């Protein structure tokens, strides 16, 4: 049996016009861009990356952002060249990692990974996630015959879950048990934290990636007496799969809220709610509702994200200064009118 540690899908996002720098860096690694007729998802414009990927920009909401996504097709085509390019891109451009798929592939004859996972889940040995579901066999690419086999461990709507499936069947080869994959999908802050650790590991990246892979779920033999999960034994197949390593349970690295993120929250969540309240109570102006809230929360002390507060002070100080100058000008004009001097 042969094993391989690697990545499947990786998505990076950034602000500003960094897509041009990303295209240049990828081209320097031999990934030629090709114009697309249209963008993807929320982006209006984009380039296909040779082998399987996309660089996109011009967000439909007007946000000044861009993205790079490298698909599993490209990772399988040339994993090492792709890894070097994405490591360099992550280190040279201000990007955020929003999705990371880490995989361990097993190649051989009559593999038993899926059978072992199924048996352990049935015995109640699955830990760290609450659910396991059989994959829909019709999702595979082969349109006929026995086309899919595997399990989802954890909720697919969460920031982390695991897929264990027969990759050979998924690719339409029709041969079961020759290529099985254990794959973790991380999203949001968890993808950010894991990819940061993997890139920081440099040449030791396979070991770090494997630790983050097996840290998503765990399997422990149930015992009659009360015991913590870490004190219970692993079933033999899982202990062999983990190779004596305990894994890394990734924690979120929360970025400090800046003014842009705070104002986006105010625009999408706070203002619509206040407007609904204004209509509900029949107030003429939104400021009437705001004044009511000021009375309700009079004892609130200053706080919040220091970064957002600093940026908002700079933003609104300029607005207030302009308004104050306008008030002074209006007052001077009124005073001059009273005294009969309107010559300017």
Image: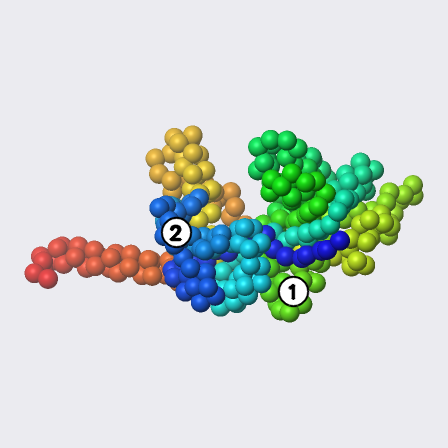
Would residue 120 be visible to someone looking at this image? Answer: yes
Q: How is the image coloured?
A: rainbow
Dividing the picture into quadrants, the one containing residue 202 is: bottom right
Q: Is residue 210 left or right of residue 298?
A: right
Please state which of residues 344 and 310 is positioned toward the viewer in this rendering: 310
Dividing the picture into quadrants, the one containing residue 140 is: top right
Q: CA distance from mark 2 to mark 1?
A: 30 Å
Number of labels in the image equals 2
- The residue carrying pointer 2 sits among few (fewer than 14), some (14 to 19) or many (20 or more) residues within 10 Å by Cα, namely many
Would residue 312 be visible to someone looking at this image? Answer: no
Please state which of residues 126 and 79 is positioned toward the viewer in this rendering: 79
- The residue carrying pointer 1 sits among few (fewer than 14), some (14 to 19) or many (20 or more) residues within 10 Å by Cα, namely some
Q: Is residue 310 left or right of residue 203?
A: left
Percent across and percent down for residue 69 are 49, 53
Tag 2, which secondary structure? strand
| Rendered position, 305 above or below 60 | below
Which residue is labeled 1 in the image?
205
Please state which of residues 263 and 337 is positioned toward the viewer in this rendering: 263
Percent across and percent down for residue 82 are 54, 61
Quadrant placement of the C terminus? bottom left
Task: Residue 46: give its label.
Answer: 2
Percent across and percent down for residue 227 are 87, 47
Percent across and percent down for residue 59 are 39, 49
Q: Name the residue at 79% across, 47% down.
A: 219
Please state which of residues 270 and 174 is positioned toward the viewer in this rendering: 174
The reply to whether discs 2 and 1 touch (Cβ–Cβ < 8 Å) is: no
Q: Name the residue at 35% across, 46% down.
A: 37
Q: Name the residue at 52% across, 46% down.
A: 297
């Amino acid at each position: 049996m042969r094993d391989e540690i690697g990545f499947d899908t990786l998505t990076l996002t950034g602000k500003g016009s960094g897509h041009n720098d990303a295209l240049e860096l990828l081209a320097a690694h031999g990934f030629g861009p090709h114009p697309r007729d249209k963008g993807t998802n929320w982006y209006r414009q984009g380039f296909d990356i040779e082998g399987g990927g996309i660089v996109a920009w011009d967000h439909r909401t007007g946000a000044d952002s861009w993205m790079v996504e490298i698909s599993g097709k490209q990772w399988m085509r040339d994993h090492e060249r792709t890894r070097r390019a994405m490591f360099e891109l992550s280190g040279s451009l201000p990007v955020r990692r929003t999705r990371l798929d880490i995989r361990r592939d097993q190649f051989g004859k009559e593999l038993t990974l899926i059978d072992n996972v199924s048996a352990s889940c049935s015995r109640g040995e699955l830990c760290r996630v609450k659910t396991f579901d059989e994959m829909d066999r019709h999702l595979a690419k082969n349109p006929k015959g026995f086309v899919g086999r595997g399990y989802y461990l954890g909720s697919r709507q969460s920031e982390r879950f695991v897929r264990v499936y027969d990759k050979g069947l998924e690719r339409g080869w029709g041969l079961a048990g020759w290529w099985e994959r254990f794959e973790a999908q991380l999203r949001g802050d968890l993808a950010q934290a894991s990819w940061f650790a993997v890139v920081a590991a440099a040449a030791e990246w396979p070991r770090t990636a494997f630790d983050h892979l097996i840290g998503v779920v765990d399997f422990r033999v149930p015992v009659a007496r009360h015991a913590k999960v870490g004190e219970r034994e692993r079933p033999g197949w899982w202990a062999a799969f983990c190779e004596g390593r305990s894994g890394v349970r990734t924690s979120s690295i929360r970025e400090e809220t800046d003014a842009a993120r705070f104002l986006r929250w105010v625009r999408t969540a706070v203002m619509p709610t206040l407007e609904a309240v204004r209509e509900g109570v029949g107030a003429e102006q939104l400021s009437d509702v705001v004044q009511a809230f000021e009375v309700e929360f009079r004892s609130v002390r200053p706080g919040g994200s220091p970064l957002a507060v600093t940026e908002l002070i700079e933003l609104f100080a300029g607005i207030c200064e302009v308004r104050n100058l306008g008030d002074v000008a209006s007052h001077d004009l009124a005073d001059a009118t009273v005294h009969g001097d309107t010559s300017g």
